[in-house]
Amino acid sequence: MTDLHHDRPWMRLDLGGPHQVLSWAINRPGLVTATHIIWREVRNADLPADLNVTDWLDAQLRSQGATDDVAFLTSRDIRAFHDVSCTQDDITVRCIATVGLSNGEHIGTRMDRSGKDWGTINVAVQISAGLTPAALIESLAIAAQARTVAVMQAQHQLPTGITTGTGTDCIAIAAPAGNTAYAGMHTPLGEALGRAVFQAVDQGTRQWMRDVRRSQT
């Protein structure tokens, strides 16, 4: 569907033209029109406690000519991404996910993460069908459900319970504007969307847990 470009510490998804993008990303959050979604890999040393992260990221994006991009930050190795496409009927959904659980949380609880590593789950979804604003919102809910189920199946244990996500997760849904009005699990869009996000996050979670085990041996 699109092109994915790597130049570590950057990864950039070319949407192939203007799309409506719904997210709570650090750069250009909310409902915007964008042609790219971009990841910036960071380390703890890149983000000292007194840093204005928004200003820092803005300068970083300017250096790439990417200030109009919807932007994620991740401490995951940017090469450890998972790219899954699923088609149901005439709708194709592509999900690209980077997954780390080092600042995982159990929903409804909060651990002290001061001085710890910052892992996150960043999920970019591109949908081939043109969506109404309501369907875009519903797609975000379906993607969040799929991400959470994938994380919970890994049974990553915390003192507060199993990990259900991280404190810095972000999802961006990109689609053309159009007339598709529903994205629930009874629809072809909901089926393809749920499967793509689940598989990408599941693969990413499993790889992160393998990487952690290797680092501890």
Image (cartoon, rainbow, N blue to C red):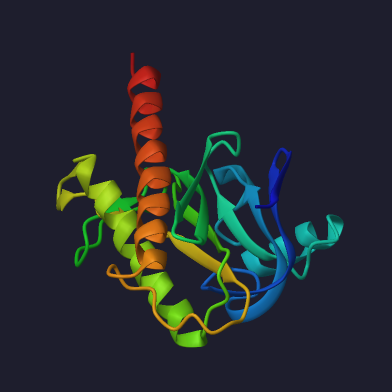
Q: Position of residue 204 (x, y in %)?
A: 42, 39
| Residue 183 to residue 215: above or below | below
Q: Residue at x 71, y 38 (%)?
A: 8
- The residue nearer to you, when weighing 164 against 34, is 34
Q: Is residue 109 left or right of residue 205?
A: left
- The residue nearer to you, when weighing 141 against 85, is 85
- The residue nearer to you, when weighing 181 against 89, is 89
| Residue 120 to residue 71: above or below | above
On the image, which quarter does residue 146 sit in? Answer: bottom left
On the image, which quarter does residue 144 sit in? Answer: bottom left
Q: Is residue 56 visible?
A: no
Classify the position of the C terminus by image quarter. top left
Q: Residue at x 34, y 67 (%)?
A: 142
On the image, which quarter does residue 28 sit in? Answer: bottom right
Q: Is residue 173 visible?
A: yes
Q: Position of residue 55 (x, y in %)?
A: 71, 68
Q: Residue at x 61, y 81 (%)?
A: 177
Q: Position of residue 49 (x, y in %)?
A: 55, 58
Q: Is residue 131 left or right of residue 68?
A: left
| Residue 183 to residue 84: above or below | below
Q: Is residue 48 left or right of residue 134?
A: right
Question: Which residue appears farthest toward the front when viewing the image?
Answer: 89
| Residue 122 to residue 43: above or below | below
Question: Which residue appears farthest toward the top when viewing the image?
Answer: 217
Q: Residue at x 40, y 30 (%)?
A: 207
Q: Position of residue 145 (x, y in %)?
A: 30, 63
Q: Is residue 185 left or right of residue 63?
A: left
- The residue nearer to you, when weighing 65 against 145, is 145
Number of labelled discs? 0
